Image (spheres, grey):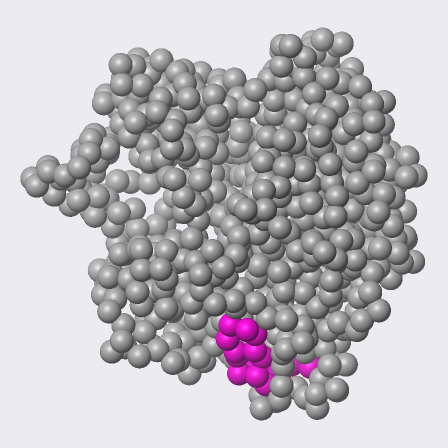
Amino acid sequence: MVSLAATFGRGAMTNHWRDIRHADLILVNGANPAEAHPVGFKWLMRAKLDRGAKIIHADPRFTRTSAVADTYLRIRTGTDVAYFGGLINYVLENRLYHEDYVRWATNAGFVVKEGYAFRDGLFNGFNAETGLYDTASWAYETDGDGQARIDPGHPRSVLNLLREHYRRYTPDLVARVTGIPREQFLRVAELVGETGRPDKVMTIVYAVGLTHHTTGVQLIRSGAILQLLLGNMGRPGGGMNAERGHANIQGNTDHAISWDILPGYLRIPAPGQKDLAAYLAASAAKKIHPRSVNYFGENYGRFLVSLLKSWYGEAATKDNQFAFHHLPKPAANASWISIFDQALRGKMQGVMLSGMTATSIGPDSNQVLKALSNLKWLLVMDPFTTTSSEFWRAPGMDPAATRTEVFMLPATHWIEKDGSFTNSGRWVQWKDQVIPPEGEARHDHWILAELFLRVRDLYETQGGIYRDPILQLSLPYKNPRKPELDEIAQEINGRDLRTGKRLATFADLKDDGSTSAGDWIYTGHYPETGNLAKRRDGVQDPGRNDPTGMGFYPGWAWSWPLNRRVLYNRASADEAGRPWDPSRPGISWEDGAWTGDVPDYPKDAAPGEDAPLPFIMTGEGVGRLFSNSVADGPFPEHYEPIESPVANPLHPGQSTTPVAFLYDKAAGRENRFGTVADYPYVATSYRLTEHEHYVTQNVEHLVRLQPEAFVEVPAGLAGEKGIVTGDMVRVSSKRGRLEVRAVVTGRLGALDIDGRKVYQIGIPIHWGFVGINTGQHWLANALTPFVGDASSRTPEYKAFLVNIEKI
């Protein structure tokens, strides 16, 4: 989310699954869609079979995706910046980038402010005492009106700085860092370079194999920069396509499951922002190019005020700044790991868990277990018992020493309720209830409504400090204790409060209190004509339902924003409005109007010298090769994982990122990072087709398919250790150990990393100490480090050091 928003303006899959069939080249990194997303993988295969697209899979393991790829690259986990950086260097050095696109649609010509520097692994603006960068120091030169200076030939133009930054990423350096042989890398680079032509297009498909690193934001951004250089953003068959891990992870993100945002990716207010004006000044992007639309920045106030009207109704008025003061203004990080860090410190009384199990999901499970033991109370809402609701039963735990009171509230499974899922491609699709709830199970939103109303009753009868945010919250439902999801969907869509009618577009949202919207990007999905997420005009009549022939199917469900199927699609056509590739048009200017997909652009803006620039969500109006919207550098740089078998050859003195958050160090706890001397092998975690995270340990048929925990061991390492398939092995890190079966395989192999043989071990994540096979006292995350990346505090699940021995 962070990396894509920092580059393009929005944090979401840019195209959609069906669109992948239009690609000529598909790079798959940090993902195994053949097994983890098998339904969506159909469209990669359609590209391969129908148009001869090439699939290049870079992964530590040879998987079913690798088996059908045209090229498999065995890569050391966590080194994708070096891989993409090498491709960026190859494209720049050989002038294979799409020059017209780069000049018009990126910030290549923007001049960076004097003082920018990168030396010895550090960008300018680093504060060694705080461990943070001053991101404001990564800025553009501006004129007296605050407009960016543009001079492509200037030594500090973004393109020239980019060229200088990645000049170090030679094919030899790529091989030293990633383990990909030089000649194999060059063959891939040739294929990638070809897609800088207007008649070619490449897509990048990725998943949490890129995200779950202390450098995850930059791993993804390095791919995004490559796509901008090649002119592949906004185009059918192009884009940065993030595979979401569950059916509704995108919907969760859109509706602010992350602590630091409000619905629709509005920022949470910060301390010191005492009024709307201060909040907007700090949060809304500024227009720094005269032809920038800056749609998000210019309309930020409308979106926030409409959200506050949705939440506080008549209590949100112009006189009280629409109840802005009711919003929390957290002074400290409140991300997932931070919650359990606070519990470890004894600063957290209670935690509510809904639809997730902290014990299994969190890094360093042993510390999470200790954190849960420090709580006064724990509330779990779930259809099944979990490793959190039963955490005191974990191996080594002493129930007598656990003071936590646990409340288990049975919640309905998604098949027991209706509602919407938002898939990876931003499609909001309504589903029906399949079976009625069993026993005393309640919908989770009913449980939350009941809890809220009881808390509100206590405030009303007993008083309390600052009661208004609780007492004034609006619950405009027929039954506030049991709101229907259809009612909530209408509330999210928003209304014209003067007429009471639901809105058809977020363009009608106002900042005067006359409109409401629970999430502005979803405005239009439930207008007066009905719930568009229920639409099913699909392949039963392609001629009628897909008039462009491009697979947009605008009458199937609804895609945010405003039913656009490809984001940034103005960049699919040149400055004159002509598609770069007429055989794969996104939108085009014809007879005084934009035709094709719903334009991600002012619908009446004709092409021309004074026309708005194509990326409407950034203050620059263009895609960002250089960005100060991330915490760890304006250009992606290769840093080693926090635990690594080798030093960083680019800057050994600053081998890892200087701004990763080291929770144990910050809290004064003992160091829990291992070294290669004690833990000489790299481990990575992943999922299996037969299981969905941890919940399917309760499904008998799936447990039969994958009944027992195991680790995959490369055949070469197994030979050195005397391990054969079926042996029990102990896999240990500085934080914990697993004792499980070994599967000896050729899917993993040794890599030559800077002259050192490096083995990687594969660890599926799905088992624990609850479920059908309750004897499986096993948690993959007992091994992973308690550390977060700089921008979003994402844990490093995908690269850590272990040892392995036969039991």
The quadrant of the picture occupied by the C terminus is bottom right
Magenta stretch: dominant secondary structure = strand
Q: From which residue to which does the magenta span run?
A: 729-745
Q: Where 757 falls versus 644 (above or below)?
A: below
Q: Is 147 positioned to the left or the right of 790 in the image?
A: right
Q: Quadrant of residue 377?
A: bottom left
Q: Where 634 falls versus 711 (above or below)?
A: above
Q: Position of residue 246 (x, y in %)?
A: 51, 53
Q: Position of residue 30 (x, y in %)?
A: 67, 56
Q: Position of residue 383 (x, y in %)?
A: 33, 61
Q: Position of residue 250 (x, y in %)?
A: 51, 44
Magenta highlight on residue 737: yes
Magenta highlight on residue 660: no
Picture mark count = 0
Q: Quadrant of residue 323?
A: top left
The quadrant of the picture occupied by the N terminus is top right
Look at 67% across and 72% down and name the residue there.
676
Residue 234 in view in this figure: no
